[in-house]
Image (cartoon, rainbow, N blue to C red):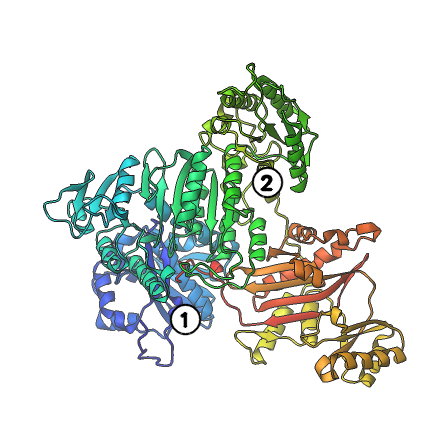
């Protein structure tokens, strides 16, 4: 809807202000600018508003809008007068407008239909109208509210903005500064979390479910879902729907038969969830039927959408638009379904013929095939689930939404996710960090090396390499694994065992060889194994029990790996039932000892794994490490009252009884344990996340002015931005205390000599053409030139080997002390945000991808970890007898770059290369800075659902 504007025909309709939002109750609404075509909608909306609400809006009885009012409220210039509406379907449910009353001040007013009050509509509108105002250089809102209008006063006071409040002439006068604050951002994210979690909860716990597309004859997708719902023991009502059902058909497989969802609603029953299993061409009619009948969510199993090509992608977008217009959420299309094992629900609205056992693992997949494989693998190893979702093309609900739900879900202790694309990596890492602060999040990502998302996943393109995304996930506390087998292995250990307090691992068993393999695997994973304890092949279950008890009681170990091979019984063979006997002995030892993780590596012992897993998921967990406690992540995640963060004493043995994970190979058990060790360390560090240092010599205002001037006086390529000249880059960096060694251009030999005389010998001669920069292997750098003759000779050689001075672009620079050449970079990706990167300079590091990354703003702890996390870090710390370099100076440089990029979103990239770090201090020899007009990052703006 982009009609011409009568009062200001030159003002373009601001389509980018349109947004879908999730409301407090989990439903959705669309926010968009009000246009001249909305007159009838506005009048209809106003007629449904109560006299009391009208009185609160206009401070007097105001039964109807005059023609002048309607014209005023539908004609805007989108600069000084702006109106937004929240809509469901094609109808207004709320409006907000501002009128500018000063250069940077505007008066704001809301009106919410009474039937939709309490859903958080006004709060969402305030977020969006505030963002619009900032875009139009309005920095302050004023509002007059009647004292009795407590709901609207609360909308303003709870928003988190800096505000002033006074009582004047019988009304409350409110002034809000619209600059986002930590408080306003925290309020926004808390509301987002509650709304998105509620939208998931509504789908996982419906009161009634209808399956659309159930055939009369056995067989088919719809009939299979109906049967699975029935067999799971779903506690709500089930309905079978097919528009081809004859009137004489009253039920199918015990479920009432209907020709439409509307016919179910006509009986007085509201259907909360509908499973759609009809051809894609019939889905729009089903969506309309569901929307008109008050359905809250759809599981669209139907295929033929984005995975089938451009035409299917457009059908998928249309499906999303139609569903959201009714306030419905979608799982799918091309979905496998969802499962909730809670005793009060027992929902299996999926194609899985059997519901998994009830447990405490939440599982999300973007692939039905992988979902089937994971369900099977977890079932074979005795693991239970709290909930399962296979979202297919995940046009709407995604892993982000389920992380929001699982964060607070008391029935879920660990989240396992198989992802093939991450539509919003910035938001995903934020949510994952918040959830990982209270329960493990394990992720395996498919399509890592294809360079694009699978065909069905219509997600924004990101330039960030997978290695960078992986590093950022680790920073967020996510346990990133490579295969679905590792996903199950790590998930079982984390679901059933306490977190280790450290990396010390005791190994015991009845096979010396298997113990040595386990010891080697521990070293490979950078654990600290103790010498294996060989119980010999004659060890009986009671010997295992005693040895495990001693190991768990030893303060010198943090975890125990038990290795076992079949043993010879009294009759000379392994006896049946020995696996169950050994499992009972190990579980008794673990129950009677201090809480430490235990895992078993076994070879061909029948019944052992099943017996060990018997208690899987029956007790809440995971527990904290024996020492230290985890607390919410620094971005405000977590519940301070959570038992996981309380640092309490270990629970009594009776409540700690749980399954012990078993593995068929030492490497798999050790890898899962190593993941737990690293995660536990992250949890401990999350309690003290570090700080962002303040530097007195930083001139933030001066830098802002310089950036504004540079952007104002130059033509900026929207796609590439503005590359600063070396002098401008040096000046800007200097305002943040980042010194860059000066260089002088040398278009001829005489200019080179003049530059050398200015700096003083010895000097360096460098080629700076883009194809030669930072390529010493091509001979474009000549160092330690000590005389004029040497400089002229080097200049002639450089020109002869690489081309004319115009092609080579030589410069002269003073020499600095020897050290280790490093690279510091920061770049902004719209999907991720600002990323700070560090590595050593040179082809080997680039070839091996040996670069570390952290999100901006970086803390002092982030900077320290950044330089220590690359594989070539030993070169900085005195490798092979060399002098250690000044890592403190390097950390400070990283923090200053982080501050620069965080303070000024116009800086889209910074590259310092090389940075020579010596034993005392460092030198930045080259710098490149690129500017662009700032783009509001979606995760930092008002809440909105993605629209792919």
- Label at residue 671: 2
Residue 37's image quarter? bottom left
Q: Which element carries disc 2, helix, strand or loop?
A: helix
Query: Between residues 638 and 215, which one lies in front from this camera angle?
Result: 215
The residue at 32%/36% (across/down) is 346
Q: Quadrant of the C terminus?
A: bottom left
Query: Between residues 357 and 37, which one lies in front from this camera angle?
Result: 357
When the figure is inspected, residue 733 is found, relative to residue 441, above or below; the finding is below
Foreground: disc 1 or disc 2: 2
How dense is the environment of label 2, judged by Cα within 10 Å: few (below 14), some, or many (20 and up)? many
Q: Position of residue 912 (x, y in %)?
A: 69, 66
Give the distance between the C-alpha atoms of the residues marked 1 and 2, in whole angstroms.
64 Å
Among numbered discs 1 and 2, the one appearing first in the sequence: 1
Q: Which element carries disc 1, helix, strand or loop?
A: loop
How dense is the environment of label 1, judged by Cα within 10 Å: few (below 14), some, or many (20 and up)? some
Q: Quadrant of the N terminus?
A: bottom left
In the image as oriented, which residue stretches furthest toward the front? Answer: 572
Residue ID for mark 1: 101
The residue at 59%/18% (across/down) is 540
Q: Position of residue 630 (x, y in %)?
A: 57, 39
Q: Is residue 275 left or right of residue 587?
A: left
């Amino acid at each position: 809807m982009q009609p011409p504007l009568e009062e200001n025909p030159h003002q373009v309709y601001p389509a980018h202000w349109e947004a879908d939002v999730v409301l407090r109750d989990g439903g959705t609404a669309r926010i968009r600018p009000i246009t001249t075509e909305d007159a009838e909608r506005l009048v209809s909306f106003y007629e449904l508003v109560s006299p009391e609400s009208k009185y609160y809006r206009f401070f007097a009885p105001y039964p109807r809008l005059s023609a002048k009012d309607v014209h005023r409220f539908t004609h805007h210039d989108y600069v000084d007068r702006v109106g937004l509406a929240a809509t469901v379907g094609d109808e207004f449910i709320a409006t907000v407008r501002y009128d500018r009353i000063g250069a940077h001040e505007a008066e704001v007013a809301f009106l919410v239909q009474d039937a939709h009050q309490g859903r958080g509509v006004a709060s969402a509108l305030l977020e969006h109208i505030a963002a619009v105002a900032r875009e139009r250089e309005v920095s302050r809102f004023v509002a007059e509210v009647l004292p009795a209008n407590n709901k609207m006063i609360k909308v303003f006071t709870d928003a988190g903005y800096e505000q002033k409040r006074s009582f004047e002439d019988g009304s409350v006068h409110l002034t809000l500064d619209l600059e986002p604050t930590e408080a306003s951002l925290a309020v926004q994210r808390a509301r987002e979390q509650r709304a998105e979690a509620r939208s998931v909860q509504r789908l996982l716990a419906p009161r009634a479910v209808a399956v659309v597309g159930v055939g009369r004859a056995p067989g088919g997708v719809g009939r299979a879902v109906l049967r699975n719902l029935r067999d799971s023991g779903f506690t709500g009502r089930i309905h079978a729907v097919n528009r081809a059902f004859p009137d004489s058909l009253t039920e199918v497989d015990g479920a009432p038969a209907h020709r439409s969802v509307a016919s179910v609603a006509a009986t007085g029953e509201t259907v909360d969830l509908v499973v759609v299993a009809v051809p894609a061409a019939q889905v729009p009619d089903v969506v309309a039927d569901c929307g008109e009948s008050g359905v809250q969510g759809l599981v669209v199993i139907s295929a033929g959408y984005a995975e089938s090509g451009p035409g299917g992608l457009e059908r998928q977008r249309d499906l999303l638009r139609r569903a959201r217009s009714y306030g419905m959420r979608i799982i799918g299309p091309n979905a496998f379904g969802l499962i909730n094992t809670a005793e009060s629900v027992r929902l299996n609205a999926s194609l899985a013929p059997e519901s998994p056992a009830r447990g405490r693992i939440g599982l999300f997949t973007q692939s039905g095939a992988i979902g089937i494989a994971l369900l099977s693998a977890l079932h074979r190893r005795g693991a239970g689930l709290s909930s399962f979702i296979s979202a297919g093309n995940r046009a709407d609900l995604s892993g982000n939404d389920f992380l929001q739900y699982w964060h607070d879900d008391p029935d879920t202790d660990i989240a396992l996710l198989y992802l093939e694309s991450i539509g919003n990596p910035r938001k995903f890492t934020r949510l994952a960090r918040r959830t990982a602060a209270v329960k493990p999040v394990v992720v395996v990502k498919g399509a890592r090396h294809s360079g694009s998302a699978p065909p069905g996943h219509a997600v924004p393109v990101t330039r960030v390499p997978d290695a960078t995304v992986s590093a950022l996930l680790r920073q967020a506390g996510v346990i990133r694994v490579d295969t679905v087998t590792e996903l199950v292995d790590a998930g079982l250990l984390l679901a059933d065992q306490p977190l280790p307090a450290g990396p010390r691992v005791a190994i015991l068993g009845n096979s010396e060889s298997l113990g040595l393999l386990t010891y080697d695997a521990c070293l490979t994973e950078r654990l600290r194994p103790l010498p294996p304890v060989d119980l010999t092949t004659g060890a009986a279950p009671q010997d295992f029990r005693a040895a495990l008890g001693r190991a768990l009681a030893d303060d010198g170990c943090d975890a125990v790996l038990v290795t076992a091979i079949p043993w010879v019984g009294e009759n000379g063979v392994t006896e049946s039932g020995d696996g169950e006997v050994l499992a009972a002995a190990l579980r008794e030892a673990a129950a009677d000892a201090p809480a430490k993780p235990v895992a078993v590596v076994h070879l061909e012992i029948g019944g052992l794994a099943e017996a060990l897993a018997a208690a899987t998921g029956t007790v809440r967990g995971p527990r904290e490490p024996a020492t230290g406690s985890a607390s919410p992540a620094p971005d405000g995640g977590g519940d301070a009252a959570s038992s996981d963060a309380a640092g309490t004493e270990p629970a009594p043995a009776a409540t700690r009884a749980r399954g012990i994970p078993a593995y068929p190979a030492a490497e798999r058990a050790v890898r899962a344990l190593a993941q737990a060790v690293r995660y536990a360390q992250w949890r401990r560090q999350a309690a003290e996340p570090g700080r962002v240092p303040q530097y007195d010599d930083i001139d933030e205002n001066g830098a802002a002015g310089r950036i504004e001037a540079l952007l104002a006086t130059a033509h900026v390529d929207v796609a590439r931005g503005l590359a600063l000249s070396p002098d401008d880059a040096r000046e800007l960096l200097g305002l943040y205390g980042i010194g860059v060694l000066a260089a002088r251009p040398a278009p001829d030999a005489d200019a080179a000599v003049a530059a050398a005389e200015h700096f003083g010998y010895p000097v360096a001669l460098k080629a700076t053409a883009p194809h030669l920069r930072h390529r010493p292997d091509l001979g474009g750098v000549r160092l330690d030139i000590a005389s004029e003759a040497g400089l002229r000779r080097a200049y002639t050689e450089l020109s002869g080997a690489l081309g004319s001075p115009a092609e080579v672009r030589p410069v002269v620079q003073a020499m600095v002390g020897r050290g280790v050449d490093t690279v510091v970079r920061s770049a902004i990706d719209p999907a991720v945000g600002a990323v700070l990167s560090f590595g050593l300079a040179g082809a080997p590091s680039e070839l091996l991808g040996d670069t570390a990354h952290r999100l901006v703003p970086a803390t002092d702890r982030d900077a320290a970890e950044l330089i220590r996390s690359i594989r070539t870090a030993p070169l900085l710390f005195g490798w092979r007898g060399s002098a250690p370099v000044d890592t403190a100076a390097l950390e400070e440089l990283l923090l200053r770059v982080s501050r620069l990029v965080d303070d000024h979103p116009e800086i889209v990239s910074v590259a310092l290369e090389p940075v020579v770090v010596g034993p005392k201090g460092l030198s930045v020899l080259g710098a490149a800075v690129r500017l662009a007009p700032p783009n509001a990052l979606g995760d930092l703006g008002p809440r909105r659902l993605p629209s792919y």
